[in-house]
Amino acid sequence: MRTLSKAIAAGLYCLWALPASAQVFQDIAGSVGIGTYAQAPLMGGGVAAADFDEDGDIDLFVPNTGGFADQLYVNLGDGRFAEQAMQRGLAHAGRSRTALWVDVDNDGDLDLLVGTDCFGFQAACSQGGSGLRLYTQESNGNFVERTEAAGLVEDMRNFGPFQHRGGLAAGDIDNDGDLDVYAAIWDSAEPAPAIRGAASGSAASRLYRNNGDGSFTDISAAAGVLLGGNSGQWQPLMFDLDRDGWTDIFVSVDFGANLWWRNLGNGQFSDQAAAVGLAYAGNDLTLSGGNDMGAVFGDDDGDGDFDLYLTNIVDGYFQGERNVLLRNLGGTSPQFADVTASAGVGETAWGWGATFVDGDLDGDLDLAVTNGFSVPQYVNDRSCYFRQEAPGQYVDRATLVGFDDTLWGSTVIAADLDNDGSPELIQTTKVHPDFGPLRIMRSSSSHAWLKLRPRQRAGNRQAIGAVVHLRHADRLQSRLISAGTSFLGQEPAEALFGLGADTTSLASIHLSWPDGRESLWDGIAPRQVLSIDDDRLATLGFE
């Protein structure tokens, strides 16, 4: 590997220093052009963040329900957004719940997969239609629906009265260079005896293999991941957890044990969650039950591997439950240990979305958690913000940092929307009791930072599945480039690192590409956005 010189680093586009101020989140959605929206009742819905138009900043797609059109907020690059769903061909008015930006046809631009929910809309769903909709991006930046041609039709007439759309995730399960999709379904596992065990529909979570031509094949049964009723699957995460070169699938499960579908490398998957300590569902009374919803990977202890945080329902509605932080003990045969109590991140409320975020750019990951439900004792649940104030030790500073709303939160993701190096929190809310809001929570920090956008020449253009390691001032930080996280959410395919008060030390970057290649660069100056592209690396003379 060759060293990236300061001259070359200066040639990559740099951003200005952040103003010195304390970390406080403020909702700026209204001032930047993001309006009220209609979100799904009860369970809420998601938000998908990505630079779909490749202009260097992050755009937002917001699925809506109840006859309200989905929304596409295009980042104008000057701090403002413009809603363009109608003119781009994405203003579907129906029952959307979640969405995922993913390049399905390997043409280098992002397409959009949207998941539809039938819960509460059985009459409409009984008329037919698809539970998934695929929109492919054309050369003019507009979108055309190609669900049927892609083989992704999920007949909504098969959805039962107690089935929800779960989350979406993408990853390359067969190492062929394109992205496959896992689409989760939450199925009729309500707690009430009159509902539990009620007849559900035939819809189920599905694994779709990308055929490489813009179409997919349902391989759920052949791969061994097809489950029957009462499998309350919420958020899937796709990542090579055991570092054997094959993408695995983790799924958070409501009313049951979580799933870790280990990729055996032969087209088959085996649920080995219990063997590695991931089946635990945050319930002190039993390891086989619980109410896990949100799920997020992050290297919270800075040891180079990825830990898992799961949201749950805190003691009161279901006795003994809590959120859970499962720490990865490392190795090629992973094991996870429950460190929730020592870390101080278990007690929240009725939990939904969560994300690891270095909000103050001090080099330590914090945790944002959004809560709330229509059950009377949870209507005033506030969001939580666990700041890591010592290694592995968190304190809820939600009120101090301004993230303590009681808006019945659903999804929360992190993204640097204005390219200033400080992450925003993007939060969806449920009907409480009226529509919206979609919140954009902005903060600032005087600390140094570095942001990396890995891009590949062909196939998986956004390098989904890549792992970025950064070493700065003898501290290791790691980020996973993924598609699908939190609760029904998606964060952009980039890695943002806080570097603390040290603004002069240079950093080194180790990038593990999805295809197994390794790249290393030294001498990286802080306060830069680095676009690391296969073609660009070749131009700059890197091996």
Image: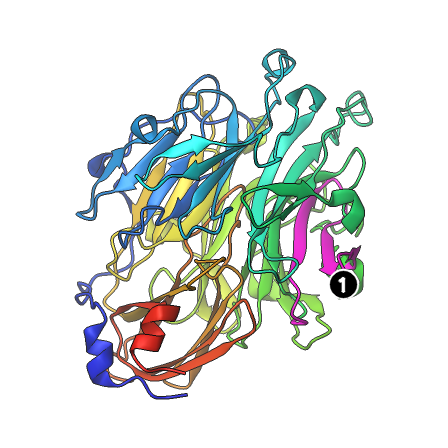
Does the magenta segment cover residue 257? yes
Farthest-out residue, front: 213
Residue at left offset 59%, top offset 25%: 130
- Residue 108 on image: x %, y %: 41, 53
- Residue 290 on image: x %, y %: 72, 44
Does the magenta segment cover residue 72? no
Vertical side of 31 occupied by 20: above or below: below
Residue at left offset 28%, top offset 80%: 502
Query: Total label count?
Result: 1
- Residue 336, picture quadrant: bottom right
Would residue 203 appear left or right of 506 to someone viewing this image? right
Vertical side of 293 occupied by 93: above or below: above
Amino acid bearing label 1 = Leu
Is residue 38 something one can see in this rendering?
yes
Q: Which residues make up the magenta segment?
A: 243-272
Residue at left offset 71%, top offset 23%: 158
The residue nearer to you, when weighing 93 against 314, is: 93
Would residue 274 appear left or right of 72 to someone viewing this image? right
- Residue 203 on image: x %, y %: 72, 30
Callout 1 environment at 10 Å: few (<14), some (14 to 19), or many (20+)? some
- Residue 228, picture quadrant: top right
Quarter of the image where the N terminus is located: bottom left
**Element type at marker 1?**
loop
Quarter of the image where the C terminus is located: bottom left
Q: Which colour scheme is used?
A: rainbow
Would residue 280 appear left or right of 325 to someone viewing this image? right
Question: Disc 1 designates what residue?
Answer: 264
The residue nearer to you, when weighing 288 against 297, is: 297
